[in-house]
Image (cartoon, rainbow, N blue to C red):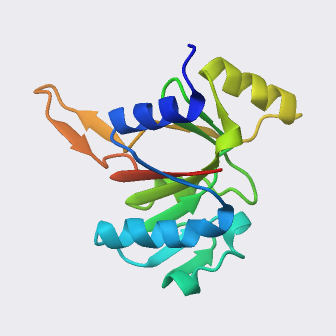
Amino acid sequence: MDWELVPRFRERCFSSSSTVEEIARLDQVPPAVARYLTENALPPACVCWPEFASLEWTDAGLQVEARPATGDDAVGISGAFCAVAETGTLMLLSGPESYATTSLLPETHIAVVPATRIVRSMEDACDLLRRERATLPRQVTFVSGPSRTGDIEMTLVLGIHGPYRVHVIVVG
């Protein structure tokens, strides 16, 4: 495990059918989201976690609401507690300001992850959770690419139990 964290995370995301963009600063998130949505012919209406509500969404041509996702929302933007380089996995914690539905209900999930929150292994992610949280949240969600399932004939189907697309924006 002597690899660099961000390149390894990116590589593992790609192998699980996620896409990744790296940006330098948080204020670059709205244009990055707009690029992704435009390139994939997706709608400009999104829901997000409250921590991203103050970003300049309208300047990027987006309509973003800070609220939990419903079944009618096509795009959800979340943060992540941390990300795991070894597997390309996001670790999300539910809470009053981090709605679980944002990563689960929309067809497209966009996660914003600071590069400083990418850890080497799942064990490191669990250690970080124990160090930073006195109690476990009601829900811990691990996201390793789009939702998928295969039937007995080995037919892979995306988006069965969650998003069809996962896009990760690494900041920093």
Vertical arrangement, residue 19 with respect to residue 70, above or below = above
| Residue at x 46%, y 79% (from the top left corner) | 45
Q: Nearer the viewer, residue 136 or 41?
A: 41
Can the viewer see residue 93 in this picture?
yes
**Residue extending furthest toward the left:** 153
Give the quarter of the figure containing the N terminus. Answer: top right
- Indicate the position of residue 67 as horizontal and vertical percent values: 63, 71
Query: In the image, 28: left or right of 144?
Result: right
Q: Residue furthest right?
A: 134
| Left or right: 25 as drawn, with respect to 43 | right
The quarter of the picture where residue 91 lies is top right
> How far across and down, in percent of the image, does residue 34 sit?
45, 73
Residue drawn at point x = 69 percent, y = 39 percent:
117
4, 14: nearer the viewer: 4
Q: Quadrant of residue 129?
A: top right
Residue 35, image x and y in percent? 41, 69
Left or right of residue 41, residue 53 in this image: right
Residue 109, how many percent across, how many down?
Answer: 46, 56
**Residue at 48% from the left image edge and 67% from the top image edge:** 33
Q: Is residue 51 above or below residue 72?
A: above
Label count reads 0
Decide if residue 68 is in sight here: no
Q: Residue at x 33, y 52 (%)?
A: 164
